[in-house]
Image (tube, rainbow, N blue to C red):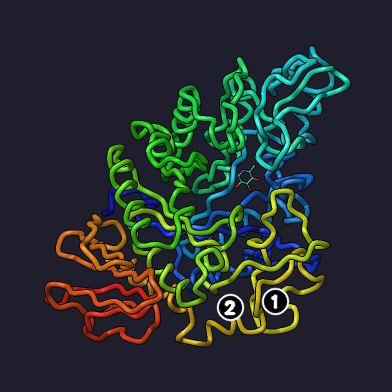
């Protein structure tokens, strides 16, 4: 395993910095807050943390509208804070991935301010402009409305796949491409372990501006898939590969086809890892998950690529709420996530079994309706739940007085301890960490798979139904991890409760 890259056996933890931990009492999380809570990540046993954008930004998309790729927004701290956070994470053995937003910038970015100043400005071509009077096409923007905004002063349309405050850049312009490369080098030279790259599939567009087919319900960003984007990725990969130790390019490829997403690893010369969101949108159903695993194995396997597994993130309702079924089902989902073949991504707070927060209309702030999954991390049972000053920017998820880090850490039977035990089991088992996967026959409602690496074997059983199920297995098996925590260390009795999952170890 030693010549494998570090990310192949890594479990990732996603931090949404506004919501994780606040050090200065303004109600918005910050880098010092994250640094102060690294011990939680080390205790939990994750290998790497991905931090969503903390760069200078007017925050119309809460940081995904970047106004300076090479500086920290004062809301989140300073570059020195970042350096300290990185050094302390590394000292704890935790790698740090930062977000990189190359498809668009803020309309307040100095590049766009220059570009829009006149049609013959040297940076005009760093963005995508089109003549009027008609809009060039019918593309829909990601949060509603069209992808085109008229710029009155220079009498042209500019393209934005997201908000009008997020103009798309023109990667075909070599100066823009070089400037973007410089922003990567800036963070690589500081020592980051890699990047989560935003909207990879958007990087190039068909600038003959064809219409999307009539009746296309998806925003254009979710269907834009082009050969010339792959050349850009190969350039990024060359840049990353020039660094040692190895750095990770993890791409958000928001195209809802596993085969297409897998293509973004190229021939081992593009992304190292690509997010496949089809499992995130799969229902909590054994057949649906069996089909997901089969397809991922075929399509990622064809490319020799390492899969990724995400149940929740900052763009979607939390999976505990989506799946229904309460905490027991969320526990079964934790075992599924952490034992699949590929890189699992734990979204902050899922280890507490957080539900979606209810956000009253007067507290809605996100133009994309995503506030409910971005609630503040409850650290303890005090009135401020570990947030030291102003009320946090978003409401709490339900029950923060009992569902918080301190309370669940003090309770061995909690979901938080289940995450920790499952992560420890994964780390201790080559089969679970990097081994092969084979689906096994199982009764309706149950998913069964085996993970193997050499002599090391584990069987995972997940009962997606609320009804108990009998599962016959050849050989003798001991329960290593039990989502309900009841059977660990005992022989597997041949049945599962409803909403129940186990990791089994062969005793033969
Ligand atoms: C994907 C990010 O995950 C999302 O939060 C953001 O709004 C869009 N890209 C635009 O940057």
Q: Quadrant of residue 398?
A: bottom right
Look at the image and tell me in which quarter the N terminus lies.
bottom left
**Does the rendering let one see residue 486?**
yes
Number of residues whose C-alpha sits closer than 10 Å to that of mark 1, classed few (under 14), some (14–19) or many (20 or more): some
Left/right placement of residue 158 relative to residue 283 reads right
Residue that appears at 79% across and 45% down: 58
Residue 82, x across and y down, in percent: 64, 54
Q: In which quarter of the image is residue 302?
A: top left
Q: Quadrant of ligand 1?
A: top right
Residue that appears at 49% across and 48% down: 193
Task: Please name whichever residue, 3 or 363, is drawn nearer the observer in this view of the structure.
Answer: 363
Asked which secondary structure carries label 1, the reply is loop
Left/right placement of residue 473 relative to residue 261 reads left
Q: Mark 2 points at which residue?
A: 405
Residue 436, x across and y down, in percent: 24, 55
Above or below, 297 against 311 in this view is above
Q: Residue lying at the far front in this picture: please name it.
A: 215
Q: Mark 1 points at which residue?
A: 386
Q: Are marks 1 and 2 in contact (CB under 8 Å)?
A: yes
**Does the rendering let one see residue 106?**
no
Above or below, 211 against 464 in this view is above
Residue 465, x across and y down, in percent: 38, 71
Look at the image and tell me in which quarter the C terminus lies.
bottom left
Residue 455, x across and y down, in percent: 14, 64
Task: Please name whichever residue, 436 or 464, is drawn nearer the observer in this view of the structure.
Answer: 464
Residue that appears at 59% across and 42% down: 100
* Disc 1 to disc 2, C-alpha distance: 10 Å
Task: Please name whichever residue, 302 or 427, is drawn nearer the observer in this view of the structure.
Answer: 302
Asked which secondary structure carries label 2, the reply is helix
């Amino acid at each position: 395993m030693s010549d494998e890259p570090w990310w192949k056996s890594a479990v990732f933890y996603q931090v949404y910095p506004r919501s994780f931990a606040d050090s200065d009492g303004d109600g918005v999380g910050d880098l010092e807050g994250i640094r102060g809570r690294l011990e939680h990540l080390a205790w939990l046993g994750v290998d790497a943390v991905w931090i969503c954008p903390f760069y200078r930004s007017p925050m119309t998309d809460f940081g995904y509208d970047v106004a300076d790729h090479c500086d920290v927004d004062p809301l989140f701290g300073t570059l020195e804070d970042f350096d300290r956070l990185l050094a302390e994470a590394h000292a704890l053995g935790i790698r740090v991935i930062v977000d990189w937003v190359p498809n668009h910038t803020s309309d307040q970015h100095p590049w766009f301010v220059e570009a829009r100043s006149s049609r013959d400005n040297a940076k005009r071509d760093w963005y995508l402009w089109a003549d009027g009077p008609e809009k060039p096409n019918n593309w829909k923007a990601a949060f509603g409305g069209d992808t085109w905004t008229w710029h009155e002063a220079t009498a042209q349309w500019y393209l934005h796949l997201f908000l009008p405050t997020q103009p798309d850049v023109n990667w075909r312009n070599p100066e823009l491409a070089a400037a973007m490369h410089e922003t990567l080098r800036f963070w690589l030279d500081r020592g980051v372990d890699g990047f989560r790259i935003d909207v990879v599939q958007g990087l190039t567009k068909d600038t003959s501006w064809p219409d999307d087919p009539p009746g296309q319900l998806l925003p254009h960003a979710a269907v834009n898939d082009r050969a010339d984007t792959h050349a850009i990725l190969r350039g990024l990969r060359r840049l990353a590969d020039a660094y040692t130790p190895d750095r990770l390019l993890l791409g958000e490829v928001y195209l809802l086809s596993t085969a297409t997403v897998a293509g973004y690893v190229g021939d081992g010369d593009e992304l190292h890892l690509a997010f496949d969101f089809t499992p995130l949108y799969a229902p909590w159903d054994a057949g649906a998950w069996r089909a997901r695993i089969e397809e991922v194995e075929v399509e990622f396997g064809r490319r020799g690529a390492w899969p990724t597994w995400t149940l929740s993130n900052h763009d979607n309702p939390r999976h505990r709420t989506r799946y229904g079924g309460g905490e027991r089902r969320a526990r079964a989902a934790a075992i599924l996530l952490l034992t699949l073949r590929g890189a699992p991504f734990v979204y902050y707070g899922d280890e507490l079994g957080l539900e979606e927060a209810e956000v009253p209309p007067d507290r809605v702030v996100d133009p994309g309706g995503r506030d409910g999954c971005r609630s503040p991390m409850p650290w303890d049972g005090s009135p401020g739940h570990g947030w030291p000053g102003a009320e946090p920017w978003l409401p709490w998820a339900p029950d923060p007085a009992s569902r918080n880090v301190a309370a669940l850490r003090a309770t061995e039977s909690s979901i938080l301890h289940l995450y920790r035990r499952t992560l420890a089991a994964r780390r201790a088992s080559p089969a679970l960490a990097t081994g092969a996967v084979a689906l096994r026959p199982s009764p309706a409602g149950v998913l069964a798979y085996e993970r193997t690496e050499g002599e090391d074997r584990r069987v995972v059983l997940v009962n997606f139904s609320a009804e108990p199920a009998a599962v016959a297995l050849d050989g003798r098996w001991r329960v290593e991890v039990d989502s309900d925590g009841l059977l660990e260390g005992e022989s597997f009795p041949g049945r599962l409760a409803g909403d129940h999952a186990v990791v089994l170890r062969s005793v033969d």
